[in-house]
Each structure stands twice: as structure tokens, then as C-alpha cells.
Amino acid sequence: MAEAHEAVAFEFRVGAEGVNLNVSYDVFKALLYAGLRSWKLRCRRTMNSLYNTIYPGHPLFGIASCGIVYGLNTKGHDPSNGLIDWLDLHIFKRYFTPDNSKILACIVFGTGAYIVLVQIRQSALKKLFSYHGWMYQEHGKKMRFGTKLWGSLVKLLIGRNPSLYSYQSVLPTLPLPSLDDTLRRYLRTIRPLCNDEEYHRMVTLAEEFRETIGRKLQRYLWLKWLISTNYVSDWWEKFVYLRGRSPIMVNSNFYGLDTAYVRPTKIQTARAANIVCAAFQYRNELDHQNIKPLMVQNLIPLCSSQYERQFNTTRIPGKETDKLVHYSDSHHIAVYHKGRWYKVFMFYKDNLLQPCELQIQLDEIIKDPTLPCYGEEHLGALTAGERTLWAEAHQTYFSTGVNRSSLEAIEKAAFTLILDDEEYDIGVNTTDKFDTYARSVLHGKGYDRWFDKSLNFIISKNGVVGINVEHSWADAPVSVHLYEYMIAEDIVNFSYDELGNTRGTPRFVALKPIKLKWLIPEACNNMIEKSLAQAKNLYENVDLHVYVHNAYGKGFMKKCKLSPDAYIQMALQLAHYRDSGRFNLTYEASMTRLFRDGRTETVRSCSIESSQWVKSMENPTVTKNERIKLLRRACDYHQQQYRDAMTGKGIDRHLFCLYVLSKYLEIESPFLQQVLHEPWKLSTSQTPVTYDDQHLKRLMAKNPDVVARYGIINSHSLVPLGGGFGPVAADGYGVSYIIATEDLIYFHISSNRSAPETDSKRFGQRIRQAMEDMRALFDEESQNVDGFYEHKKI
């Protein structure tokens, strides 16, 4: 490792021999080019902002509008009804010649008229996007005429070439539900969880809340709704994520795994180089807003605000609350390998490194014989332990000097890259080894990840990829979008040569990696080891199991005319009832990104309908036909709840905001205390797949030799194994599932070893049995029952 390169461009020393000025010219040039790139990026962002301001209009149409107005005026027609002449006479003739003043008056009127038309169009779109009745109707020929007319108007006004943030200004505001509706829906969801006495107690508490402080809190919340773009998201980020003082490792961060079907290389640095370059390529697309906003039914845009902090973002610890810091740009990554931290520049003379050039830099790190500084190897444990301890260490030992410079190199990096020293044998025939792989990506050894960074890319010694994501800046679907893009670029576009190395010929010799320096005193090292002990106690308690269900998948569920998500949720309800012997509060995450700055809402999967169906499955006297009817009814109600959550008619975020207000106003509410402290014994989430299938198809058409070499058939060949998160309740389960293909589902199940009631592998078997029992309902005999396929698909 070349130690000539320092972390700063200048080193100024005054000693006995006089003044010594040491200039690192390579780093100095890198900084100059970084400044040039940042300036270009700011200009591009300014232009994009102007473009988005008038979208779905276009600047060219504005210019054409001015030209038409001027042409009509010269022909003796006045489209302004005298306003152009007034502008000409009272403003422009004072400073310009008559000809020029007339032109300027026409330009001002033409521009103003076009802006007014754009504003009208934007207001119309915002009203149209506020309508969500289409979600509750059948699609196709049976859709109502009014909904078809609504769809036609949206298509007419929506525009043709949006950038990532073009629709942000026309997205509607998340509506505030009425207090009565929320309380009514809440009481309905807890009925299967309570006996009569408990239920009547909650009814009484809810009624007291409604008649006393509930209305007052609702009025205050209405004021917040009136002045904010989203009345939930800022409080959700602050109080759910940043105010938490417990470790974010396992408790907050989530993980994602590699694809199981294709192993492109076993060379660690080659895979890492491709992944990192693909991530920077994606970041460049984000910076230029070339990525299209996600659309529902290719018609309704989803909010894109969460993409803004995907890169160059870190979480800074505080004694009472953390803060999320996003940097406008970053030109390097932070790399961890065998206890050492490095800074690796990703640009050389304003050119992004190609994978073959980056692999050379990463090989330098692998070959480096330098030992870690004192305290450096376990330094990352500070981000894995209690937040208050990390905040104290951050302020005391990392606010000045070399420690501050090195820490800033990590915090200001685009993301962190972890070159792991372990191998993972994963594939279609090694599913029994998925658990070890998933545990490593979730928490590692407690010190070999930087859990505060928005993204940690983890590359095993044999080239298997994983991602660990800090949760406060965004939700899983945004990271999945990036992950799918990277995997496609890595395997299909960049690809590898016959030996497994990156392809291409280096254009230049880039800056060598800079090994970060640390001066860790004994007291700080003690804090590091204390944080590591906390992290170790936490991750050793995690019971994580990846259950692969390959008997059938969404193809069969669709044939039964049932929503795959609702079907799986019912299977989880049956499995959990058999595992615990009772019904429990169940969380399923849905998104509210149909609204500006929307994040998530809760779907309470345990309902009256689902409990009735579960009981019928445990009652041998109930016929198959009756069980099918109850299952359909439960799935329909679950879909109804999911649509309500997506359209701003959820329960839990509303009650959460009322609870926050009660704390601000120092008002005690027994009802809100009870609601907000109910444990989620089963917390679930579905990982979405295949955001941009067209992107992969273009890459496959461009690289047929790679497609043939790896046997890639379609997007299913590159579907990742999904990901997961830690258990939410101490004695509960966390379940994340990904519907990978028509016949394959991955379940990531987590629980705590210290809880005698839970066992992740046992719960995986419960899921398997529940899925088998549900399939048995729809055998050939059942299909002959009258009305089996009469159920309407919504």
C-alpha cells in the first residue's frame, strides 16, 4: 500500500527546521476535478428543477407559445385583450426601442399565459390523482364508465417524458381520516384478539377518548395536516427511527441477499468492482433524474422523495436523538477489509472508474499487509451498540484531529463496501446454508459493518453479494429497485471474462486506496469493546431461518382467483395460530406513496374474517366448500384493508400521530397508551420484485453471449433471494417474504432464541404445513363444486 497518499491534499508543519509544506498532487488534482463535477451536478439539478416545475408542460411549448403570441400580434390579432399593449406602453418602452419592447411584451404575456395553462393542468392532475375508486373496482370490461372516463383524462394530461421527480408537485396530500372512522376500524381489528371482557374494556376506553381529549387532539392534528405536505412522515422518521436509543443493528436495519440461480464469479474483488460501478451508474441516473417514476397500472405515479437520500447519507448519533445527514455529492467509497478502513476514490480526472480499473484498487487492499491501527478492527461496533454510548464516543473522541478526518471519510462516502473474509456456499441445491448467509448480512460479527451508513454492500470471499440498509432514510422497495438494477448490470452488462475477472482494459492508473489513520485512546477502545459486547449479546440471540417454499407459488394462487399476498397472509395466520395457540396482533407493511412524501401504513392482517377461516381449518366438522368460502371472504377483506391503507384510510399512523400530540401537550390518554404499547407478535412484509423488466430485456438483447453463458432466460433468473429484518416483539416473529417466481417463495423468519415461545425453523415448518393444507382445499374434487370459480377477481 502506498503510504505517500494522505487523506488531505496539504500537510502543513512547523518544526525546528522551519516550515514544511507537503502537497499531495494526485489528491489535489482529484479535489479539483471533484469540485468541477459538483459544479456540473448543481447546474444539472437546477435545470431539472426548472423542468419539473412546469411538468407536464415543456420549455419548448413555452417558447412556441411566445412565438404564436408574437405572430398573432404582428398580424393584427391581440390574444391578450389589450394586456400586451399595456405592458409595451407602461413598462418596456421606457427602456427599449419600440420593436424590442413589443417583442418583450409578447414574450412576457406568452410565458405568463403558458404558465397559467400549466398550473391549470397540474391542478387538474392533482385532483385526478386524488381519486382512488379505481382500486376498488374490477379492471377490464366491467370497469365503470366514470372510472374509464377518469383514466382517459389522466392519460390525456399526464405527459409523456417525466423525470424521476416530475410528478412530486401534483401528488395529493395524505388525507386525515376522521376520528370516528379510525376508532371504529380499530375496534373491529382487535375483536378476534380479545375476550368479551377485554373487548368491552377497550370499547369503553375508546369512547372516553372520543368524548374527552380525542376531538382536541384531532383538531391540532388537522392544523398540522393543513400546513405540511405529509402529516405522518416527519414524525415517523423522528420518533420511530431517530429517537430510538437501542441498537439499530437487527432492531432497525434490514438486509437483502444475492440471486441463487447465477454465480457469475468467485473472485471477490471482481464482483465487488462490478457491483460498486453499477451502484455509481445508478446514482448517476438518479442525479440526472433519468430513472422514470414508478407507476401503478402505468398510470398513477408513486412518490419518489425517498430516492433523494439513497446515497451519500449517514446517520449521526446523538445523546437524545440521532440526525440523518445527506451530502449533495461524494466522490469516494469507504472500504473495510480485515479490520482496516480505506478511502477509495471513484473518479479520476472527472471520469468514473470502470470495473477493471476499480478491481486493481481493491486488489491493492486485499494484498496490503498493513495491520489495523489500535482500536480500528472493532471500530464499527460503535454503530452496532446502544446509541447513547456511540454519541458520547463520537463527541469525545471523533470531533477533532485525525479521528475526525478518518471518520468523515466514512460518513461522507457514497456508501460502504465490506470485503468479507468468509465464504458462503449458496445455490439452488444448498438452501440449508441460507441461514448462515442471511445472518452474516444482517449483523456480521457486530463490528465489520458500518450500520449508520445508508447502504453497506457486502461481498464474501467467494463473490457472494449482500446488502445491509439503514432504515430511517427510506423503506425496502427503494433499495430493492437499486439492487435489481445492480444485479442486472453486474451480471449481464459488465459481466466477467473466462477467468472470472472484470472485463475491459484499464485506461489509466487511478489513485491508490488511502488507508485511514486512527488514534484511539484506551478509554475509547473500552467504549468500542463495550459496544461490541452489547452487539454480540443482541445478534447471538437472533434466530434466523430462510424457508424456501418451492411446492407452488403465485401461479397456483392466481388460478384459484385469490390475491397472492392475501393468500400468503392467510397462511401466516394459520401457521401462527398453530404455533402460539391463539390469535395475535399482526403487522403487514403497505405503502402510502400514492401521496406526497408517503412512506408506509399498517395492514392488520388478523381480522374477524381471517380468524373465522383459521378456526374452520382446525375444526374437522367444517366442509371443504365452507372453508373455501371463508378463505375467499378473508382474502377479500384483507385486500379491502390493504387498499384502505394505501389510500390514506389506515388506522395506526393516525393513532400514532395523536399519541405524539398527546405527549407534546402533556396529556395522558389510557386509550392511546394501550394502543401504542400493544406488541406486534407477528410482523410481516412482502419484498417486491421486477421493477424495470424492460431494463433487463435491453441488456439481454445487447449481450446475447452472456445470456447464453449463464443460462439467463428472463428476469426470474436474476430474482434475488429476498431479505428480512429482526423480530419486532421480544416473543414474536418477523417474517419477510418474496414471491420470486410462479412456483417459488422465500420466507425470511426471525425470532429471539431467549423467547421459549418462538422457534424460527419450527415456524417455517408451520408455514409449509399451512400452505399444503390450503392447497389441499383446491384439489380436483373441490374444483367440481358449484360456484368454485364464480368468485370475482378484483
Image (cartoon, rainbow, N blue to C red):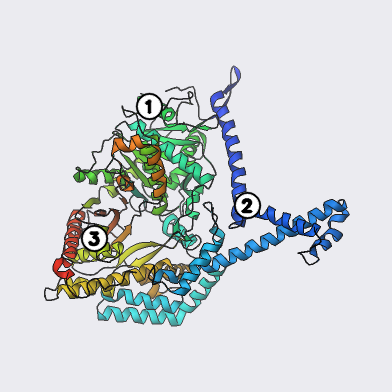
Could you tell me which residue is drawn at 39 percent across and 82 percent down? 207
Q: Which residue is mark 1?
A: 363
> Which residue in the rendered view is the most extreme toward the front?
75
User: Which residue is label 2 attached to?
Assistant: 50
- Of tags 2 and 3, the one toward the viewer is 3
Q: Disc 1 versus disc 3: distance between alpha carbons?
A: 48 Å
Q: Earlier in the sequence, mark 1 or mark 3?
A: 1
- The structure residue drawn at horizontal position 42% and vertical position 77%, both measured from the top left corner, is 181
- Return the x and y of residue 189 as percentages of the image width and height: 32, 74
Image position of 189 (left or right of 694): left
- In x, y percent, where is residue 430? 20, 42
Q: Where in the figure is residue 556, as x and y percent of width and height?
A: 23, 60
Q: Could one spot residue 721 in this view of the protein?
A: yes
Q: Which mark is residue 556?
A: 3
The disc label shown at residue 694, or none: none
- Work out which quarter of the rendered image holds the C terminus and state it: bottom left
Among all residues in the image, which is located at the extreme top?
Answer: 17
Q: Dot 2 lies on which element?
A: helix
Q: CA distance from mark 1 to mark 2?
A: 43 Å
Element under disc 3: helix
Work out whether mark 1 precedes mark 2 in sequence or the reverse, and give the earlier one. 2
**Callout 2–callout 3 Cβ contact below 8 Å:** no
Name the one closer to the observer, 212 or 764: 764
